[in-house]
Image (cartoon, rainbow, N blue to C red):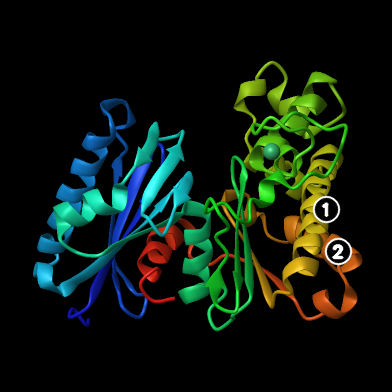
């Protein structure tokens, strides 16, 4: 293992902070995870990051000179060039000069990036998008995050919020989204959307495995339980998954028409469902996209899993 040039990747979430040591060619050498002490204020989180980063480097036998930089994915509205978190509701951060604070403490260069973009950068560096210059990534979890890479560069936009795929409007009469608008893609195609549709099936006592298993236990329904029921060929569950996947595929066709990608990567917990999800995504995508654009676009599952965030954060120094 080449130890001369190591980068730290940090995936800062509202519940956990994932940290890793990554070589300059994208090998994940070490990873660890600590809880995010959101309640104790920003300084507690910064202290935890600084102490743990120094500790893992030292435990791994690195001198601090071998650590060349730290990248961090942050869920929120960022001023990337200035290194300032404008607003991160999950962390209760506002106008925090995180880059400067961490550089002063760690004495190494620090780069920040929106968390969904970081996952896309990681997948494009050494994951499913390796070798491609035009990559779109959608991460399907509680919501739907996105990252768009054109000519090898991630799109930021003014607020570092480009590629908010989850909030593409798909219906005027839909469900109210967490963002306040009505009918956003993630009200249907996220884990939250899938669970909501499953609850309707059970509440209406439709003939379904879901009703058998979750009648009176609506809070126990997860996206995985719906995907599992769909794999057992339950008609209602299959219809839910198809609806979620189809609308995602249609939205991705719009995104492809705008950005002309080579590959679309689907990540997040829901993406582990396999063909039951990917077939209707592809069907809608190829049907709705401009033929000359979409005909050669691959739609593939992400390969880095939970490590995309830390690897992508380190990749900020390489792409
Ligand atoms: Zn929305």
Q: Secondary structure at mark 1?
A: helix
Residue 12 is at least partly visible in this image? no
Find out if the beta carbon at label 2 lies less than 8 Å from the nearest ligand 1 atom: no
Task: Assess disc 1: are there few (<14), some (14-19) or many (≥20) residues with their C-alpha within 10 Å of its C-alpha.
Answer: many
Residue bearing mark 2: 283
Point out residue 5 in the picture as x, y percentages from the top left corner.
22, 78
Task: Assess disc 2: are there few (<14), some (14-19) or many (≥20) residues with their C-alpha within 10 Å of its C-alpha.
Answer: some
Q: Residue at x 70, y 32 (%)?
A: 177
Q: Is residue 149 above or below residue 278?
A: below
Quadrant location of the N terminus in the rendered image = bottom left
Quadrant in the rendering for residue 290: bottom right
Marked residue nearer the N-terminal end (2 or 1):
1
Quadrant in the rendering for residue 173: top right
Q: Secondary structure at mark 2?
A: helix
Residue 293 is at least partly visible in this image? yes
Q: Residue at x 86, y 67 (%)?
A: 289
Quadrant location of the C terminus in the rendered image = bottom left
Q: Which mark is residue 246?
A: 1
**Relative depth, front residue between 136 and 199:** 136
Point out residue 281 in the picture as x, y percentages from the top left corner.
79, 59
- Work out how far the residue at label 2 is from the one at label 1, CA to CA, in angstroms: 7 Å
Quadrant in the rendering for residue 272: bottom right
Q: Residue at x 32, y 37 (%)?
A: 36
Find out if the beta carbon at label 1 lies less than 8 Å from the nearest ligand 1 atom: no
Query: In the image, ligand 1 is in what quadrant?
Result: top right
Q: Is residue 92 above or below residue 11?
A: above
Please report contact status of discs 2 and 1: CB closer than 8 Å, yes or no: yes
Q: Is residue 76 above or below residue 272?
A: above
Point out residue 170 in the picture as x, y percentages from the top left corner.
82, 44
């Amino acid at each position: 293992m080449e130890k001369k040039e190591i980068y730290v990747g940090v995936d800062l979430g509202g519940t956990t902070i994932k940290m890793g040591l990554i070589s300059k060619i994208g090998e994940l050498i070490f990873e660890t995870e600590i809880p995010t002490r959101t309640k104790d204020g920003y300084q507690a989180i910064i202290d935890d990051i600084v102490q743990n980063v120094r500790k893992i480097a030292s435990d791994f036998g690195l001198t601090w000179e071998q650590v060349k930089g730290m990248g961090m994915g942050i869920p929120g509205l960022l001023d990337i060039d200035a290194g300032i978190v404008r607003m991160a509701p999950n962390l209760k951060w506002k106008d925090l000069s995180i880059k400067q604070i961490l550089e002063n403490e760690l004495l190494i260069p620090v780069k920040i990036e929106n968390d969904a973009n970081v996952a896309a950068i990681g997948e494009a560096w050494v994951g499913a998008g390796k070798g491609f210059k035009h990559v779109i990534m959608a991460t399907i979890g509680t919501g739907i995050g996105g990252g768009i890479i054109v000519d090898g560069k991630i799109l930021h936009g003014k607020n570092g919020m480009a590629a908010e795929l989850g909030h593409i409007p798909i219906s005027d009469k839909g469900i109210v989204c967490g963002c306040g608008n009505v009918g956003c893609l993630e009200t249907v195609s996220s884990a939250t959307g899938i669970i909501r549709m499953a609850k309707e099936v059970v509440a209406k006592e439709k003939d379904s495995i879901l009703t058998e298993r979750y009648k009176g236990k609506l809070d126990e329904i997860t996206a995985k339980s719906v995907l599992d029921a769909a794999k057992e060929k339950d008609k209602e569950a299959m219809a839910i998954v198809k609806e979620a996947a189809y609308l995602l595929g249609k939205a991705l066709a719009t995104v492809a028409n705008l950005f002309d990608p080579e590959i679309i990567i689907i990540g997040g917990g829901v993406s582990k469902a396999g063909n039951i999800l990917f077939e209707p995504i592809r069907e809608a995508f190829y049907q709705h996209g401009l033929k000359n654009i979409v005909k050669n676009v691959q739609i593939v599952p992400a390969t880095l899993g939970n490590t995309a965030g830390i690897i992508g954060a380190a990749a900020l120094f390489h792409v």
